[in-house]
């Protein structure tokens, strides 16, 4: 049995075959499709566009009643591979897909057909799906992205989809640089559309992902933390140094520059704004307030130099109330005794 | 009735079938197409390109007079699914579409055909449409984007399009991170082209969207507000501190840096410029003026130090006129009485 | 006459039809194609890539001698729509097109064929064309972009193209956010290629566009103007204030930051450099010079403090020559009389 | 033997040919495919997306038992070229591919068929593959990217793939601007999938690449090095100059601006963070600390001016402990002898 | 002779035609293809990706022995246009192409066939090719980009390619905004691959391009030049002004900001680093050194104020050695005589 036997077999198989017809013996029977996937790679999880790009190898198995033969009649050929565009194939669709061009030429791949009618269809595919991210805890967040596969036009009475393996095959998984794969669960929910009363069985792969933090710690958390920590020392610089206001306004500028980095990094998402974003915003607000505060203190100082006295009520507010609130203490050595005393003098 | 019956049916149906011919019994009758959509996701509403990307599931229903059969003749098979490229399908076109490649392979999806001739065509599609944004109130704006579906070549006498459901199905709607869906109305205007006297019925889906503001408040409104508020205190810093000019020019620089963020965020639109953009522009102008003002004041101060007197008219203008305009009051303690007096001295 | 009559008609029409053959009765006759367009939208006019993206609805009309029939023979069917890939269609090409993939599936649209042989082919298309911009007057510039349509392989003796309407249809025009459409002229030049002696008739649509300025005024002209105006006041700040050099160098920095915005906004074009770009460049040069000048003045001042006298020739140059050039006058009050005198002292 | 003979030959060859059938004489035999490649160009190795784009010329050779003829019967025609979409071709797949649209029209290229049945299929292809980068030593790093070719559906018993040449052909290699090609090894591992017991022979091309450093040295290493070196001199500036704090905070700002450059350049990778990134982060942290330190020192100085004494314990810590740690020595000339002494005075 | 004659002709021509067969009379003869091009536009020459995008109109001519007829038999029809996908066409390939999707639907264009068998195939095409740039002299550089066309599978014995015109047709050339076309040479090298002994004739179009400099002068050379020139004056500012260190560090910051512009503009190329890039790097290094120098000078000054003397050896080095090296002279007026003397005092 060589190429001629096989060629005869293919011709015979496809002679009365219609690819529009579900390969079942009884019309009321569903086609039972088994599906399993190999997660090859998480190509990208885009923060801003909220889209997940994955490289997945799909494997679909079903039994086609109209693709059976007796191997002995064909020189022992018990398996042929036929281009998928010549056969009926299940219209398994990824529901979350947001790929713009739906031109996937799946038909380029072959179906392996055994003489018992068992068909195996293996497809390497790149999917682009919507994945809503919850960024409250960014960059310490965990995300779950779902990939829901179901037949597009056949309901449960005509096509059943079940998972072929209890677990997602991860033996070829290439680790992503930014995300750590926590788990890849298989769920089998049943979808019901508003249009139609029928139920559609589906297979959902839930990928649990954890963000790796080193990049964000290095470029974001550490520098912002340091700048905001440094800004507290604005109040330490005395007014007569001629640098008090300069320091605070330059720190304000630094924060603003940093905002450029942050705006590029964070998604335009308002559902669950990242806490770090608000922290960054607060730093700028604090910088602006401390700049204003410095300006006022410097004026007070120079008015004091010119002989103006601080109004009594202001003196009281700052020295007694504020000093206690902000816990500003200075170490003063009057005469013999050195001690820490709460006072606002250092602010000037 | 199994695969063989169904295969025979499909062959019979398509034997004398021409996909160029509208499936009506009387040539003067229109094909009545019912359409309804499921809004799956608003993928993106691009501020700058003014384009809306949506993921929509279309459902088209019509009755094909030339696709009817007696189920009993075909072993009870009362429904088949046939690839759309073999059948006549309505050329429903989205008029606002700006997708560059018009390669959508709609034919990959199947039509479900019942023995009564009823055809159902279900399509998951990604649309990219033009949507003119009115940004006067940015980022507190609401937008309305229209999706107008109509037959491209058949007028009302040949194809009628009506909405299948009174409302857009939102049961599978995935909320967008940046925009909140306010409503999704269905309108049925009739389009009339300048080329031809015929009327074209159409279905228009009007999506009302409201921008979620948290992102813009955090990265834009708050920081700009704080910087501009801080800039008022330029006049508080006394000239002899050696920081008056530095402060104002560094705030000018901060505003300029901020402009980088803004230019990236706002669309190049001039029809309805966002008020916030003008505010941002005004801040820079104000900063430049206050820098100039600081420079003049510093010069006046040092000339005063050197013994030059301020010319009498300038003294009058500042001390009496400007001081009242800008409400600059100082708290002075001359001799025994402390009081607030309007004077320009603090500016120096 | 229903679907069966129409199906018979289509079969008859296409039975001896060859889509490679021009539909003329005498082989020496040209096919007369009438074309008119609806300008739907100017999607984008890219400053940097010098490309224009337009959404246009093309309408082509011609009379096909081999697509005529007697409606009475076909149950009164006097009009059918046939997929364009089955018929001869004129190979009208847009000469300025720079779209990378030439995959436009025009064949997806149908041709409306009347029993008199009149064919109407309506196509919604997105074009991307080269458009050379002249940016001398940016952002107050007007541009003209041409769209030249002509048959790609048929010369005037085989295909004539004429405009169907005297004007471009603008009834569906969606205004562009950045550009105002001034006019859309129709020209009918005749193209002659170096390769061949034949003439090719063409239809050219000349779109006149005017840039809307608000965006550029807001983000570019106003801020740059203010910064450069503020820079003049560098000379007003006295040297002893300890802020003269700081002011000028920070303004230099602001200008540099602004250059970042400008570089992003302007195209890399050198044919006709925008005047505003040179202005921006001049501001930086001026800032650098004023920084240098400030440094020299500060040194002079402190040397004067230490007792060094300004060399006599320099004193003369500045006090007499420069002071008159730059019109630096000061208001001095010596003894009783106050008057404005030209002097350079204020620069120190 | 001219075009007619060749046309007859092609018709004869394809008359009983089925492109779904492997061209072997005995069905249990594998097709022996020899493959060799010419590495034409490394188009891009994207740091951020971790993707490698290569331009490769593939050459596949096999012997088709069903494509043999006697040249004498066909006028001496001993070789024809047949479009690949009409013949069986091995489904060699690149396993690392992450190209989104799998529309490669390989069928556009022809197979050269000799009368002995030898088929040669030459394909120019652009591949986009995942390549995990290890960036610990960035920008002095070396990377290895693998391109694994194997049959997608045929296991070792049905298709054998071997390398045609012992080495990758580099005679047409166009050097990449950013990466130097160290080696291009050919490996022949056997892949075994979890799904199936069969082995799949494969060909792996391992490209060893070394980053050229000049760009990164110029724009990254040198400037960052200089800024961080300059920052040490913050402690040299005395407190009374009124520039100590300004200097440190402006250097902090410079580092922050530099972070913008770095964030653009480095990939978001956390597996093996680049050491340079951490260095850059450390510089910012150090700047923030030195700003804080400057502020404290300036306060101490001015308190000293006002008569406050430094607390004894602080004096001891700085003058004895810290001075030794940081090796701050000054050159002092007391009376007659000048000598270097460890002391903290210079910090003030 | 109308449409019916032409239809009969086309049917007859294609009846025994095989598009896999080279149209020659003797099988050992090569097909002689003449090619000429019209360079329509240089769409883009990307500095960073080192890719050239060109819009070219290709014209291919050859004589097909199997496409000849007697015009008199077909009513005088002496020329027909046949869709290219029905005919044999030469597989002319652009060797430098790096376009990712090789889907060019060349078959959409028609071949003009004359009754003598002469075929003309005219194609408008957009090419994207690799072009290695040598940027040593950037932005005053000239580049040469090659476009090599050759048959992909036919060697010299089967397909000969010659240039139809001695020069590239530039009559429709649209000038590029960034690059000036110096010349467009035609070369006819013969390529020999390592795989095979056969020679492949080829046509190479060498485009000589010169960068237009105005943009780079305006945005890059002038500003960087001014900033670096201004930086020399750091040494002019006296230490007691309290601005010496501020000036140098702010200029350092300006340079760093400028680096952002440069990094965006220059390609990541290390083969031939642009001299301007190194200049820009040197400016930053110089700024850092001058900042450090300023810091030291300021310390020296204030130590001098406090009574510390400069160590004798340092005094000698600066006043005698450095002063001569850097040619720092001051104009001093001691007693009666004013003269320029070399001294380092001004640095303090």
Image: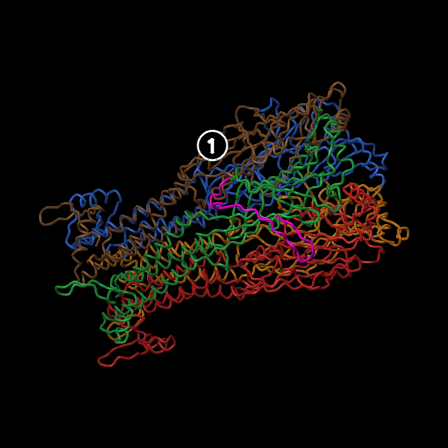
Chain colours: A green, B red, C orange, D brown, E blue
In-front residue for pair A285/A291: A285
**What percent of the width, then of the height, locates residue E326?**
27, 44
Residue sitting farthest toward the right? C73
**What percent of the width, then of the height, locates residue D92?**
61, 32
Query: Is A171 situated left or right of C73 in this image?
Result: left
What range of the chain is rendered magenta? A174-202
Where B92 sits versus B236, above or below?
above
Q: Which residue is mark 1?
A: D208
**What percent of the width, then of the height, locates residue D84?**
68, 32
Residue C82 seen anywhere in this rendered image of the structure? yes
Residue E190 seen anywhere in this rendered image of the structure? no
Query: Is D7 situated left or right of E285 in this image?
Result: right
Within 10 Å of disc 1 (Cα), the crowding (few <14, some 14-19, many 20+) is some
In-front residue for pair A206/C254: A206
* Badge 1: chain ID: D
Q: Quadrant of the N terminus of chain E?
A: top right
Residue sitting farthest toward the bottom? B337
**What percent of the width, then of the height, locates residue D49?**
50, 43
Q: Quadrant of residue D101?
A: top right
Residue A181: say if magenta: yes
Q: Quadrant of residue E278?
A: top left
At 57% from the left and 55% from the top, the residue drawn is B44
In-front residue for pair B167/E221: B167
Residue B148: say if magenta: no
Q: Tag 1, which secondary structure?
A: strand
At 76% from the left and 59% from the top, the residue drawn is B160
Q: Quadrant of residue C25?
A: top right
Query: Is C46 situated left or right of C56 in this image?
Result: left
Residue sitting farthest toward the left? D336
Image mark count: 1
């Amino acid at each position: 049995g060589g190429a001629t036997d096989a060629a005869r077999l293919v011709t015979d198989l496809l002679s009365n075959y219609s690819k529009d017809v579900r390969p079942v013996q009884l019309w009321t029977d569903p086609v039972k499709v088994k599906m399993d996937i190999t997660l090859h790679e998480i190509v990208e999880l885009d923060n801003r566009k909220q889209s997940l790009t994955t490289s997945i190898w799909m494997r679909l198995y079903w039994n086609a009643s109209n693709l059976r033969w007796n191997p002995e009649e064909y020189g022992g050929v018990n398996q042929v591979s036929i281009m998928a565009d010549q056969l009926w194939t299940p219209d398994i669709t990824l529901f979350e897909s947001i790929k713009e061009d739906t031109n996937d030429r799946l038909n380029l791949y072959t179906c392996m057909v055994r003489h018992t009618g068992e068909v195996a269809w293996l497809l390497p595919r790149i999917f682009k799906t919507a994945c809503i991210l919850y960024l409250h805890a960014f960059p310490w967040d965990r995300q779950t992205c779902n990939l829901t596969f179901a037949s597009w036009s056949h309901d449960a009475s005509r096509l059943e989809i079940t998972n072929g393996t209890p677990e997602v095959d991860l033996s070829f998984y290439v680790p992503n640089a930014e995300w750590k794969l926590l788990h890849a669960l298989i769920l089998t929910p049943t979808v019901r559309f508003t249009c139609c009363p029928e139920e559609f069985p589906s297979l959902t792969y839930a990928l649990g992902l954890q963000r790796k933090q080193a990049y964000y710690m290095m470029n974001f958390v550490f520098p912002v933390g340091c700048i905001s920590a440094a800004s507290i020392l604005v109040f330490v610089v005395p007014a007569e140094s001629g640098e008090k206001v300069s320091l605070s306004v330059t720190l304000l500028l630094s924060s603003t520059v940093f905002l450029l980095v942050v705006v590029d990094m964070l998604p335009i998402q308002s559902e669950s704004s990242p806490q770090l974003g608000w922290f960054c915003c607060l730093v700028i607000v604090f910088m602006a307030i401390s700049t204003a505060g410095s300006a006022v203190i410097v004026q007070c100082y120079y008015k004091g130099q010119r002989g103006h006295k601080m109004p009594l009520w202001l003196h009281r507010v700052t020295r007694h109330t504020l000093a206690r609130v902000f816990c500003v203490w200075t170490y003063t050595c009057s005469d013999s005794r050195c001690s820490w005393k709460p006072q606002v003098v250092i602010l000037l």
